[in-house]
Image: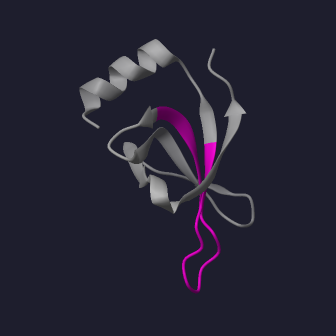
Amino acid sequence: MPRWVARIVYAVRGKRRVRLHLRDAPGFDAPTLDGVLLGRWAAHYVLLMPHLVQSGGSRVPLEGLVEVPAENVVFVQVLVAAS
């Protein structure tokens, strides 16, 4: 998703914090990402201000936008609805 489109979507849709639960990778725990969901773009979930949630509960901030292929997402948990 182009950055300018992300800014427009964020302004129009508001803040919707979600947690994406991803499929297991061989030899790893299932990763989880938190962030503001901008929507789906070309079969990818697009997150703004993403954080990687580790198994101990600690959160590691990531920079920029994260695009996650929809086929790798098991389910989307809504943490805070749009305001």
Q: In which quarter of the image is residue 82?
A: top right
Residue 77 falls in image quadrant = top right
Of residues 48 and 42, the one drawn nearer to the viewer in this rendering: 42
Is 25 within the magenta?
yes
Residue 57 occupies quadrant: bottom right
The residue that appears at 75% across and 65% down in the rendered structure is 56
Q: In which quarter of the image is the C terminus?
A: top right
Q: In the rendered image of this protein, does residue 30 appear above or below residue 67?
A: below
Side (left or right) of 16 relative to 79 = left
For residue 80, side relative to residue 38 (left or right): right
Place of residue 63 in the rendered image (x, y in percent of width and height, measured from the top left): 40, 46
For this orientation, the residue located farthest to the right is 56
Residue 12 image position (x, y, % from top left) = 44, 13
Q: Is residue 50 left or right of residue 65?
A: right
Determine if the magenta segment contains residue 44: no
Measuring from the top left, give residue 25's x and y in whole percent. 54, 77
> Magenta residues, as a range?
19-38
Residue 16 picture location, percent across and down:
59, 28
82 w.r.t. 20: above or below: above
Residue at x-position 63% and y-position 69%: 30
